[in-house]
Image: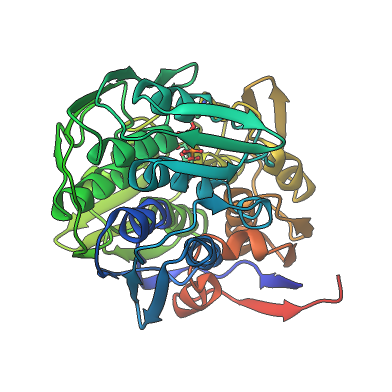
Amino acid sequence: MQKFVINGGNRLEGKVKISGSKNAVLPIAVAAAILGDNVSVLHNVPNLTDVNTLSAVLEGLGASITRKNGSLYIEPINRMEYEAPYDLVRKMRASIYVLGPLVAKLGRAKVSFPGGCAIGPRPVDLHIKGLEHLGAKVEVKKGYIYAQAERLKGSKIDLFGQHGPSVGATANVMMAATLAEGTTIIKGAAREPHVYDLAQFLNAMGADIKGIGTSTLTINGVKQLYGTEHTVISDDIEAGTFMVAAAMTNGDVSVEGIKPQQITAVSKKLIDAGIQLDWYDTGVRVTNLGELKAIDVTTAPFPGFPTDMQAQIMGLLSIASGKSTITENVHTDRFIHAAELNRMGANIKLKGSKSFIRGVPYLSGAPVMASDLRAGAVLVVAGLAATGETTVSRIYHIDRGYEEIEKKLNNIGADIERVNTDI
Ligand code: UD1
């Protein structure tokens, strides 16, 4: 196992380049490997354990995947397996993405039912409902989802769930519908930048998807999809994390490779908290002009404030002057990081899906533990801003979604080291 040892207190200054989006590359690689009839090449692919885990799932199904520099070469094979086993799926929930494409392409799928995780129960009822509307017979038995259909048939489907649209269900059903017979209309579709990028990729493969970027997608089924070349969109959550890191360290950091429309809600809240953002052609310069101000944040599906930035903004608000609140509307149990921030001197109280943050003048370094990807990210960022030494353990969570985080941070003035540990 490894941990990060951080000596806090340095001001971050300089330029940082954002990597390709983890949440975009995962479904895009699935589409390339299962739906495509020949090789696809994906550029700007981050080197992350989640990408490696998904590659193992896809190779288990029969695809062949090679990484060269920042690109993935994905070769689907004709005779595919249709089973994604528990041992692989349990490592990463996004493996559920293979369900729809397998039924669409092979007529059947057997995918281990994904469990909950540190951020809550995370059901897959909308994925199943969507596929059933396309005519698949879906059964859950002995920990597996079995889905079967001779050929999927276009249909009208509303994917707006209890917590709003679902990124995963939209992606899964949209991929399946590309090869269905006839037209599918998905209402209540998720509009996140990574869903947009997936839809663009599918159209480049020969799909016919209209309404991309809106909450109604119209998909005219086609008979075949072809391999193509695509540059993955940059990671808005990684960008947001570096923006918060700059803000919390009184920094002056240019975050390169992000567009304002990918990150509008986060930008707005940072400005409200007193941060200056200057957009230029290829990125944004983030400067902290002095005191951080308390604000109220409510997470919501895109274009709302992303749940994947909730932990990081909580870190920032823990040292903002005044009382802030955060309401978590997407993954309502996602607050494990609050207790770790409190160990560093923050004053955060939780009540249901709300957190109440009374800003403290500074955080103090402490040994803390990452419980999930974004909860890990906030502890790193908090450690950079804190006085003294912070050690963050279980950093395998962070490696799932941040490419070379310590290298990128050290390049802009941080003091953070990756250290091997016994446990
Ligand atoms: C994706 C992201 C994750 C992010 C989340 C919300 C990937 C790989 N992961 O996860 O980082 O936190 O979007 O932006 O892209 N829901 C149901 N039934 C379902 C599916 C979801 O009720 O069948 C609920 C969930 O419990 C949650 C909400 O809908 O409350 C949104 O979840 P969803 O958008 O599906 O998240 P993921 O796709 O799993």
Residue at left offset 71%, top offset 26%: 350
For the residue pair 44 and 393, the one nearer the viewer reads as: 44
Residue at left offset 17%, top offset 45%: 223
Give the image's coloring scheme.
rainbow
Tell whether 395 sits left or right of 411.
right
Residue 7 against residue 105 in the figure, above or below: below
Tell whether 200 sits left or right of 81.
left
Q: Residue 192: in sight, yes or no?
A: no
Residue at left offset 46%, top offset 54%: 241
Which residue ends up furthest to the front in the rendered image?
Answer: 150
Q: Residue 193: in sight, yes or no?
A: yes
Screen quadrant of the N terminus? bottom right
On the image, the x and y values in percent for residue 396 come to: 66, 64
For the residue pair 189 and 344, the one nearer the viewer reads as: 189
On the image, the x and y values in percent for residue 286 come to: 34, 57
Q: Looking at the rendering, which quadrant does residue 149 occupy?
A: top left
Which residue ends up furthest to the bottom in the rendered image?
Answer: 68
On the image, the x and y values in percent for residue 388 come to: 73, 67
Residue 20 against residue 275 in the figure, above or below: below
Tell whether 16 sits left or right of 329.
left
Tell whether 164 sits left or right of 255.
right
Counting every numbered tag in the picture gives 0
Residue at left offset 24%, top offset 67%: 38
For the residue pair 309 and 103, the one nearer the viewer reads as: 103
Residue 67 against residue 368 in the figure, above or below: below
Screen quadrant of the C terminus? bottom right
On the image, the x and y values in percent for residue 176 come to: 33, 39
Q: Looking at the rendering, which quadrant does residue 191 occupy?
A: top left
